[in-house]
Image (cartoon, coloured by chain):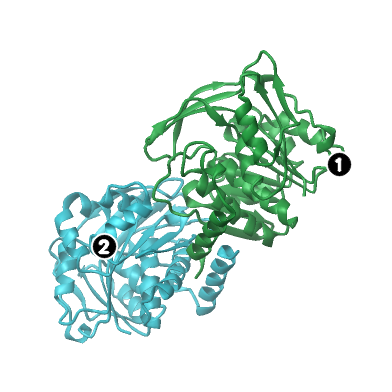
Chain colours: A cyan, B green
Amino acid sequence: MSLLTIGTVAFDALETPYGKTDKIIGGSCTYIALSSAFFLPKVNVVAVVGDDFPQAYMDTLTSKGIDLEGLQIKQGEKSFFWAGKYHNNMNSRDTLVTDLNVLADFKPAIPASYQDCEYLMLGNLTPQVQIEAIEGLAKRPKLIVMDTMNFWMDVAMDDLKRVLKMVDVLCINDEEARQLSEQYSLRTAAKLIMAMGPKTLIIKKGEHGALLFQDQNMFYCPALPLEEVFDPTGAGDTFVGGFIGYLAKTDDISFENMRKAIVYGSAMASFCVEKFGTERLLEITDQDLEGRVNEFRELARF
Amino acid sequence: MSLLTIGTVAFDALETPYGKTDKIIGGSCTYIALSSAFFLPKVNVVAVVGDDFPQAYMDTLTSKGIDLEGLQIKQGEKSFFWAGKYHNNMNSRDTLVTDLNVLADFKPAIPASYQDCEYLMLGNLTPQVQIEAIEGLAKRPKLIVMDTMNFWMDVAMDDLKRVLKMVDVLCINDEEARQLSEQYSLRTAAKLIMAMGPKTLIIKKGEHGALLFQDQNMFYCPALPLEEVFDPTGAGDTFVGGFIGYLAKTDDISFENMRKAIVYGSAMASFCVEKFGTERLLEITDQDLEGRVNEFRELARF
């Protein structure tokens, strides 16, 4: 089934206790597309970069089945750039640089060939841009999944609440769920957030796994305990990319199938953190993924 | 199978965002015994109280199948007293009062009728007292499970390392596992801690569930997301009490059965936090427990 993902394609410079990188490929859309493309022959992308974005990076994405017709390249402008440094426990980080550059006036333009979109993934972006993306589609997709972050709760809550009414699945982390609902209990928070629009809620808890809520149903997927987390950048986007990629591949949006999709997303994320940036995602084989999913099965069964 | 638990029987005074209590029954041994007695016709207890400890509390324990022959009552002395106040998120607390009283010179004396002990649960106590308890048994039990806390890592690490070599299962929380191993990754921490003696390690993660490690095997039991945590006091002891109670009932210490024991322990703990102190534990029915275990099944399956 056709999947369209909208978000950022960017440069990241990362520093973790294991080392640091120069500018490498990053951005929510990059991780989502690489992860979901693992499940699908083709993933469509709407995003924007400057003319500094290397052709080699674009070729890498294309080689993985990512269609770049919707990638705007702004001549004379620079790509979005984020630099961050992770603390020793990898659970917190400092943002060192955020240069919006081309992102500052990004208008999502959806190519005609993407209009058959049945699965839409809105990566973390200004809520207003997320709304424009939905409104840019002639036909409402079968499933719209959105990511967001606490920053938009601070500066654009009204827009955020508008887009929440337009989507089917919201994917946020535990702190964000608490901020959005003003409730500490995640179960109570989930109820309140689902009443804001999305019928399904995913709460990411990092090394503690992920929760899936819909009506009275709950699913808790543990995270696989890892010996080393090399670089957590992109893990959340890889997770949600695997989630929607699996759903689009199986074309089954039942809660039962979403449980499996969460596990596949978690498995993809567990690979992502094993190397810097997107490096590990580019290497995974079908066998790797099935092996990892079996580790999750073994981890959770009783 | 016969189960002996050693720990504290005490007074607690608790304050949570939901209210506060006067002195009520508390202590590691109390919660462990109440939880494990749910699975067994009889649970033996070795602990100490002062002459201020109410007969009514002892009658309550006895009515639940807890044998108090091993409960020393020190005339003219006071029971151990702990007062604490939980912060709004319930994940952290301040200790307001710790009066050791009778606990200061507690020597575990094991009655002859307890010597057939096959399952031994060492609740949180001075490591030295835990060693004396093991040495007070003529025959080594089939399974020894111990709890401890960061305090003993700070002040009695040598003794703690001695007792670790004598037990089969260690049950600690994630912070304690990191402190004991000096490793952030819980998977790496588990390896190092199991090399210190216990072949099996349980890492409690509070609202994030619990991990079970043995050799190359791992099991992650999620915690049931609750709408309200009324009072977390005793949840860890209730958890480990349910764990060893289930093992003693089924008399099967395979890793496969330990997975189930962790779920039963988690279910017991999920009840414990629903009311103040031991209140909720005294009300649970078999049907309640089976219903709750089914909720865990539903939560974790995919």
x then y, percent, for residue A170: 29, 64
Q: Secondary structure at mark 1?
A: loop
Residue found farthest to the top: B76
Relative to B246, residue B135 above or below: above
| Amino acid tagged 2 | Asn
Q: Which residue is mark 2?
A: A124
Res B8 → quadrant: top right
Res A49 → quadrant: bottom left
Is B135 placed left or right of B177 in the picture?
right
Foreground pick, B135 / B44: B44
Subunit under mark 1: B
| Amino acid tagged 1 | Lys
Q: Look at discs 1 and 2 and give the one toward the viewer.
A: 1
Looking at the rendered structure, which numbered label has been put on residue A170?
A: none
Quadrant (top left, top right, bottom left, bottom right) of the C terminus of chain A: bottom right
Is B234 placed left or right of A177 in the picture?
right
Q: What is the number of callouts on the image?
A: 2
Is A47 placed left or right of A272 in the picture?
left
Q: Check if mark 1 and mark 2 are on a common chain.
A: no
Q: Which residue is mark 1?
A: B139
